[in-house]
Image (cartoon, rainbow, N blue to C red):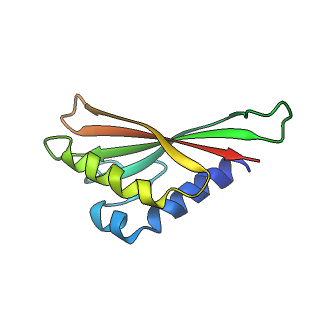
Amino acid sequence: MTQLSVAQNLYTMLTGSTALMAKIKGVYDVVPENTAGPYIAIGQLQSLRGRLLSDNERAWYADIHIWSSYQGRKEVLEIADLISPVIPPGWFAEELTVIQDPSGWYHGVLTLKGYDR
């Protein structure tokens, strides 16, 4: 699996969810200026050597950034809950952090982890 194929698969996974797409304005690699919220941006992708001693296995980490102008964490949490059911087999949600950005928007970072064997 390559960085590009992981990014493409994440995009397809997110945009393929009818429930998720009904809740957000879009999924982006680079977010256009003045984009209305809520939306998702695919963030950092990282590939690390897996648990096996050989190079046959890779551990992948992907950050999904959830942005919301709603005053509170509720919308970010609802969107994160819509992502969880569409995560492909072999991947799981490892961590969710939600903060209030200096802009006043709420920003969630959902870190996904998966293995490539």
User: Percent from the top left, x then y, of residue 116?
Assistant: 72, 47
Residue at far left of view: 71
**Residue drawn 52% across the image and 47% down it:** 92
Pick the residue in front: 6 or 35: 6
x then y, percent, for residue 52:
79, 34
Extreme-bottom residue of the structure: 18
Residue drawn at 13 percent across, 42 percent down: 71
Residue 31 visible to an observer of this rendering: no
Name the side, left or right, on which 18 lies relative to 55: left
Name the quadrant containing residue 72.
top left
Answer above or below: position of 20 versus 72.
below
Q: Is residue 62 left or right of residue 23?
A: right
Drawn side of residue 34 relative to residue 17, left or right: left
Q: Is residue 98 visible?
A: yes
Classify residue 67 by image quadrant. Answer: top left
Q: Nearer the viewer, residue 50 or 101?
A: 50
Q: Quadrant of residue 88?
A: bottom right
Number of numbered callouts drawn: 0
Q: Residue at x 86, y 34 (%)?
A: 54
Residue at 19% from the left image edge and 46% from the top image edge: 74
- Where does the image place residue 80, in percent across and percent down from the top left? 35, 49
Give the percent coordinates (x, y) of residue 45.
58, 39
Give the camera-side residue of 101 and 77. 77
**9, 85: nearer the viewer:** 85
